[in-house]
Image (tube, rainbow, N blue to C red):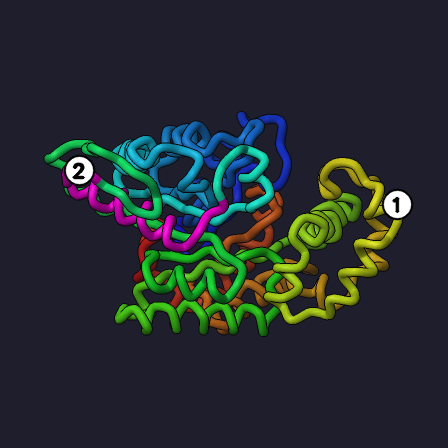
Amino acid sequence: MEQLTELGIYTLAGHSDAPHDLIGEVRQAEALGLGAAFISERFNLKDAPTLCGAAGAVSDSLGIATAATNHNTRHPLVTATFATTMHRLTAGRFALGLGRGFDALFKAMGLEPVTFAQMKDAVEIYRRLWKGETITGHDGPAGRYPYLLQDATFNEDIPVLLVGIGEKTLEFAGSCMDAVVLHTFFGDEAMARSVAAIHRGAERAGRDPKRVRIWSVLATVGDHIEEPLRLKKTVGRLSSYLRGYGDLLVKANDWDPAVLERFRADPLVQNFEGAIDARATTSELEHLATLLPDDWMGAAATGTPEQCSQAILGQFALGADSVCLHGATPEELEPILATYRSMRPASLMGLPANPGWAR
């Protein structure tokens, strides 16, 4: 079966209390010919290095990436070592994915807010270490480090990708990252603006925009999934995002902020405890659906396998190089992938399996 290197999934999408499920998902994703598995991090049961190691150990062709971890939660030598270990473990299938994270969370953890200068400095440290350099007396935005060295014989090529939402972040990503992973529930206009921002950042930095691989993240929830679960994966997921960082998502899509304010003012939203997509009942989700405009919910692949496949192909037309099918397990994606293969144009073939490298 030919590998669909332009497509990926998120493993353990959303909330999970069973990290062992990742092993079955990775095996099935590879069996279905998917190209990449993205692994998110949460400070409970989703430790990125542990999950990446497990994914690498049970796969042979699947690209693997963190999407995302943070540069400031580990010492740079520790993160660099995580990446080189995964690089060698997977024979070059690993990409280190970073994100800015959330200032409020870092403040609660006793960490400083993340800046672009910090991230760029950290990535430069990683890349120097991967090339076998000895770093002495470093004093930069990412911190002060008297002596850093992995192995003087190293000459590793490991891509770094950034997960981003806002245009400034995406411009920054285009200027110095190998790949970019966008966010779920981006409408067509937001997607086109995001691609333009990444390309703009690359051009300003004197880079070839085509060398920056762009991943759309598309909620893919077919009608073959039972409706209560579909509501969790669509209404529940979008509601969780809007509750947590809705201003960013609304700004990226140029949606009406008044709708967000009405959503947040709803008593159910105000009084709900925990993650909506994990704990809301079907009736609660049905109520929340009445608060969300059709065009907000329409930024997803839904319907028949044919309709979902058309929506996936539409992301390429908007400028994406690859699409991460979010919110569904490999088993749930199987009928969609079968249809997608019959519609797949030859122009999408030939991307590297490593999700951080461009064609």
For badge 2, the amino acid type reads Thr
Q: Which residue is mark 2?
A: 136
Side of 248 relative to 60 (left or right): right
- Give how far across and how far down residue 133 sits, in percent: 14, 40
Residue 22's place in the image compared with 297, above or below, is: above
| 207 or 111, nearer to the observer | 111
- Quarter-of-image position of residue 152: top left
- Give how far across and how far down residue 1 sits, in percent: 40, 48
Q: In the image, what residue occupies the spot 34% across and 62% down?
A: 212
Residues at badges 1 and 2 in contact (C-beta under 8 Å)?
no
Residue 133's place in the image compared with 168, above or below, is: above
- Quarter-of-image position of residue 277: top right
Residue 327 in view: yes
Q: Quadrant of the C terminus?
A: bottom left
Q: Which residue is mark 1?
A: 283
Side of 257 relative to 8 (left or right): right
For badge 1, the amino acid type reads Ser
- Give how far across and how far down residue 252 sits, in percent: 59, 66
CA gap between label 1 and label 2 equals 59 Å
Q: Secondary structure at mark 1?
A: helix
Count of marks overlaid on the render: 2
Side of 184 relative to 113 (left or right): right
Q: Secondary structure at mark 2?
A: strand
Q: In the image, what residue occupies the spot 59% across and 56% down?
A: 184
| 284 or 266, nearer to the observer | 266
Residue 90 in view: no
| 303 or 208, nearer to the observer | 208
Q: What secondary structure is the stretch in magenta mostly built from? A: helix
- Give how far across and how far down residue 208 sits, in percent: 28, 70
Q: What range is drawn magenta here?
A: 113-137
Residue 232's place in the image compared with 150, above or below, is: below
Which circle's residue, 1 or 2, is located before the other in the chain?
2
